[in-house]
Amino acid sequence: MARGLSNRGIADELVISPATVARHVTNILTKLGFASRAQIAVWAVGNDRANDS
């Protein structure tokens, strides 16, 4: 999502259905208390532990 992919784009990369992606996005929005995919993307970039060194 931080790369600007649609649900379809994410689904294609992860080899899962777009409906599964949509469900996960909804769960993330709810859990983090966000209202938009953009908020998730900003949060993800700011919390990227994989690139911390």
Image (tube, helix red, strand yellow):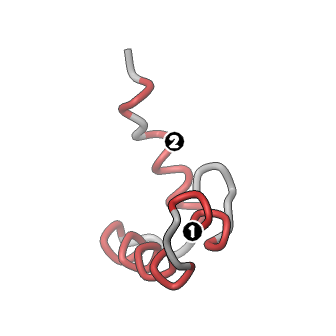
Name the kind of residue labelled 2 in the image: Val
Apparent side of residue 53 relative to residue 13 in the rendered image (left or right): left
**Which residue is depicted at the point 51% across and 80% down?**
22
Residue 10 position within the rendered picture, expressed as x and y whole percent measured from the top left: 59, 63
Q: Relative to 39, does residue 47 appear above or below in the rendering?
A: above
Residue 32 position within the rendered picture, expressed as x and y whole percent measured from the top left: 35, 66
**Which residue is depicted at the point 39% across and 30% down?**
50
Q: Residue furthest left?
A: 31
Q: Where is mark 2, residue-wise?
A: 45
**Which residue is depicted at the point 46% across and 73% down?**
25
Q: Residue furthest top?
A: 53
Number of marks present in the image shown: 2
**Which residue is depicted at the point 41% across and 74% down?**
24
Q: Relative to 1, does residue 47 appear above or below in the rendering?
A: above
Q: Residues within 10 Å of mark 1 (few under 14, many from 20)?
A: some
Q: Where is mark 1, residue-wise?
A: 11
Q: Quadrant of residue 37?
A: bottom right
Residue 27 position within the rendered picture, expressed as x and y whole percent measured from the top left: 36, 77
Apparent side of residue 31 relative to residue 11 in the rendered image (left or right): left
Q: Secondary structure at mark 1?
A: helix
Q: Secondary structure at mark 2?
A: helix
Q: Relative to 46, does residue 24 appear above or below in the rendering?
A: below
Q: Residues within 10 Å of mark 2 (few under 14, many from 20)?
A: few
Name the kind of residue labelled 1 in the image: Ala
Q: Nearer the viewer, mark 1 or mark 2?
A: 1
Residue 47 position within the rendered picture, expressed as x and y whole percent measured from the top left: 40, 40
